[in-house]
Amino acid sequence: MNASWHARIRCGRESGAGFLVTDRHVVTCAHVVSARATEAVTVTFPQLAPDPSPSSSSRGCPMPAEVVAHGGWAGGLDPGDLAVLELAEPVPVQPAEFASPAEAYADPPPRLLAYGFPKAYEEGVLAEYRATGDQLITQEWIQLEAWGQAGQTLAPGFSGAAVTLAHSGRVVGMVTSAARNKEVRHGRMLPAQVMAHYWPRLGDLIPTGEFAARDKERLRTLIDAVGAQKSWRTAGCAPDRLYRDAVGPLPSPPARRLKSLWDVAWYLLSESQDTAAIGRFATRLADYCEDAGTRTALRELGRAGRPAAPAAVTGRPPWSPILVEIAPSGAGEDRFLVEVSAYNGAHRVVIGQRPLTTREVRPYVLERIDDAYRELDPDGRELIAFILPRKWLNTDVVHWQRSKDDHSPLGSFAPVVVVELERRRSGMLQHKLRRKWQELDLRPDARLHRIACGVPPGDPVSLTIGLRRGADLLGLGAPPGRVREAFKAGLNAPVPAVIWPRSGCAGGPHDACAGKEFLDRLAERLAGLPPGELPDVVYELRLEALGSGTGAHWAHDLSLLWEDPRALPETAPFLDSPVG
């Protein structure tokens, strides 16, 4: 077993051990190099085979080193007793390899070895220990106890020594201290997963399930890019919030305080039992990133290991919708909670979730819709569904310009529908909608109920019951504000689809008005059409209207409320506090 990566460290009057983790980096205890400000730091590899080259360091020759990372240790039992030394030139030896974090705590406990340099042992000496358990002391250390009653104890000169598995030589931690009483054969180890909190690059080297070293390195780089921006802090993206978002609504408390973005990522990688949590973290973090390239890269990492969407069994491909939910925040008339998510049949991915003012909603939503397309099933049918409060349902989201570089309407890019927020949150109405769609699946076409402009709606309760029993589609000849009771009845019925013109007629005689023409043309177009095809048909109508010029086509301002609970998954409650 190669032990050439074990090192002896000296800094002034202090001496200790260390171990090579890359060809130029050595890890040791911070207290071993506490005099680095005034004293030189040297590293010696006693077991490094001599190199005949005149320019190379030979075995046993001290090599100068510089402290390039520090855990923040300030003395005594203060946490962060870790330092990383960088050598002036690479060392021609294979660095130490790490074991997975749990391997040190098997049952029965495995034999652990520490290679230190106490007085009179310039070449080094081994001590045999085992971990008392996996319980962290003050969220930092693991207790070590001697393997037997005899043999070398942990003594000055072992600080910074790698603790390795005797059977494989892989590193599980680093010795930081020993019991002051020589008759008590105990010591302390900084486990590898804790070491990586202080020097993230170590995380690449420690096995953590299916997340490969290259992916962890990429994640670290992206976290650094997000951390360098101000937006993640100003948007309230606290590390503990990201942790909760990644592990779900009822998270178990982390074993240590999460102070940084890397702390969250590394805790999820090394200690969480939920293997998908790190993907949710990467996807959630992307929402707080200003740079589009970094957002894209984080979402790609978030997709790693996620199950593929199931293939369509028969008929047309399933819908692959993007959901945009805009809900009052409870923090004022001008404050909304906005969530954009994508769904491809296998899972729903939250693309972005923010409290926003009215002015901020449109640019944020359009940017996140663009991001959401990366999550869609390429074989699925596109659909953009806006889930809106009732007073927003006539908002012209269809004609929002797609981006600052593309002024074409969003409705010309994909089918766009609206859904009422209150109805979507009602368990009773959602159940009724699912039952209605089961009935529609058995019929070749749907029944269109027309309510023309200028016609009194009658008793609202009777209208609601009548629509529930005899209507599959509801066509209105005027905007919701002019046929308020009829619109309300259609939502409460609940009718799966409601269609209306955003402008409608301007009043006066209604026997030949724009509203009547709208309903006549609509009935003609929808005759024999299954309601499940309605978004695609309305999309084609909008393309026709846009091609014929502004206002020239009868469907130029057509709005569609369409809701099939089977195609539009229920959204989870907002993770942010409504008034946060």
Image (tube, rainbow, N blue to C red):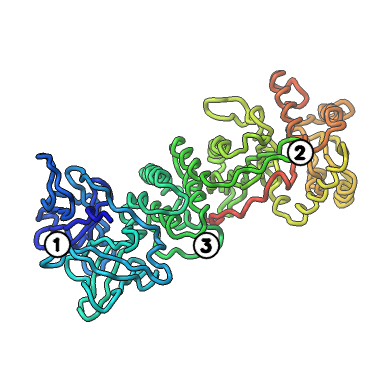
Q: Which numbered dot is residue 15?
A: 1
Q: Is residue 162 left or right of residue 213?
A: left
In this rendering, the answer to whether 185 lies above or below 56 is below
In this rendering, the answer to whether 421 lies above or below 193 is above
Q: In this view, does 113 lie to the left or right of 338?
A: left
Looking at the rendered structure, the secondary structure element under dot 3 is loop
In this rendering, the answer to whether 266 lies above or below 344 is below
Hey, which quadrant is residue 187 in on the image? bottom left
Crowding near the residue tagged with mark 2, few <14, some 14–19, many ≥20 C-alpha atoms within 10 Å: few
Query: Which of marks 3 and 1 precedes in the sequence?
Result: 1
Identified by mark 1, the residue type is Ser
Mark in front: 3 vs 2: 2
Q: Which residue lies furthest to the bottom in this view?
A: 183
Q: Residue 19 appears at what percent x and percent y?
A: 24, 55
Crowding near the residue tagged with mark 3, few <14, some 14–19, many ≥20 C-alpha atoms within 10 Å: few
Residue carrying label 3? 251
Q: Residue furthest top?
A: 548
**Residue at the (27%, 50%) spot, across then down:** 95
Measure how far apart labels 3 and 2 are at the Cα level: 39 Å
Residue carrying label 2? 314
**Front-lying residue, 424 or 257:** 257
Q: In this view, does 336 lie to the left or right of 179?
A: right
Hey, which quadrant is residue 290 in on the image? top left
Looking at the rendered structure, the secondary structure element under dot 2 is loop
Q: In this view, does 561 lie to the left or right of 34?
A: right
Measure how far apart labels 1 and 3 are at the Cα level: 43 Å
Q: Quadrant of the N terminus?
A: bottom left
Q: Which numbered dot is residue 25?
A: none
**Residue 193 can be seen, yes or no:** yes
**Residue at the (22%, 69%) spot, across then down:** 76
